[in-house]
Image (spheres, helix red, strand yellow):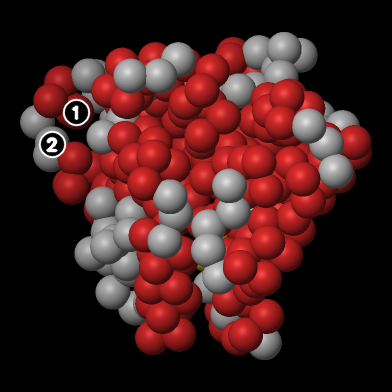
Amino acid sequence: MGTDNFFDNKSEEELWVLYKKTKEPKIRDFLIKQYAPLVKYVAGKVAMGKPGNIEYDDLVGFGVFGLIDAIEKFDPEKNVKFKTYAVTRIRGSIYDELRAIDWVPRSVRQIAKEIELAINTIEARTGKVATDQEIAEQLNVDIREFYSSMTKISSTSLLSLSDTWYSGDDNDKISIMDTIESPNTLNPDVSVEREAVKDLIVKAINELPDKEKKVLVLYYYEDLTLKEIGEVLEVTESRVSQLHTKAIIRLKAKLAEIKEGIY
């Protein structure tokens, strides 16, 4: 297929059309190289709070498989940008590998579940947002132990966001993370039911306490680091990590209630 000049004379749209027709390896390799920074970007986002035994380079390696999968399955005729499509595939590939090696201890999973249940119980009883002190009392621990638990489960919060929350016909799946990162971006052929599910998740996000909601917005929409968010909110980086983790657990608790009402 000639040299690099071939790529200089073709727009990306033309390359996609040509690749779908020919499956030419050189075009695929060009696209992989072109979007390699996207893999590093997603891996960097996933790396937040990752356990010490998981290296950033490992996350990048996992993500490359997702990028290749995205290139193979992307349909340029659909009204969806490749970058938007690829991010979901890359992130999914990384999480699939993390699940496969099962790096989250069972004890940590259990703590997260207990906190989620405590939040549900308190808010069902009071009709108000559960405070840290109320959650600690519900768990029968002091506030310092509660904060220590939040630190322990911070590494699991992003992984739990990637769990499928809704699955409809034709393998039509949606996770909480999909909604947080792209609340208004739906494929044109998406089902009405799936759109309704997204609306429910957005509603649950909007009902979070102000600081927790701000952390999600600044991290996922504004793309700020935890340190930068700390500067905006005038709190420490560890406090931001704690707020992020609480937001995710509270969000899962709210969605568990909604899900019970749907099914």
Can you see residue 101?
Answer: no
User: Percent position (x, y) of residue 118?
Assistant: 74, 55
Name the side, left or right, on which 157 lies relative to 175.
Answer: right
Q: Secondary structure at mark 1?
A: helix
Name the side, left or right, on which 92 lies relative to 25.
Answer: right
Name the residue nearer the viewer: 25 or 185: 185
User: Percent position (x, y) of residue 235?
Assistant: 40, 19
- Looking at the rendered structure, which numbered label has been put on residue 7? 1
The residue located at (49%, 50%) in the rendering is: 177
Name the side, left or right, on which 24 lies relative to 254.
Answer: left
In the rendered view, would you say 212 is above or below 174? above
Q: Quadrant of the N terminus?
A: top left
Snapshot quadrant of residue 46:
top right
The residue located at (77%, 45%) in the rendering is: 137
Task: Give the crowd class for mark 1: few <14, some 14-19, many >=20 residues within 10 Å.
Answer: some
Q: Secondary structure at mark 2?
A: loop
User: Percent position (x, y) of residue 144?
Assistant: 73, 24
Question: Between marks 2 and 1, how big is the CA–CA gap?
Answer: 5 Å
In the rendered view, would you say 26 is above or below 260? above
The residue located at (62%, 48%) in the rendering is: 249
Task: Give the crowd class for mark 2: few <14, some 14-19, many >=20 residues within 10 Å.
Answer: few
Label 2–label 1 contact, CB within 8 A: yes
Residue farthest to the right, as pictured: 106
Q: Quadrant of the C terminus?
A: bottom right
Residue on which disc 2 sits = 10
Can you see residue 115?
Answer: yes
Q: Please name the amino acid that badge 1 sits on.
A: Phe
The residue located at (34%, 40%) in the rendering is: 214
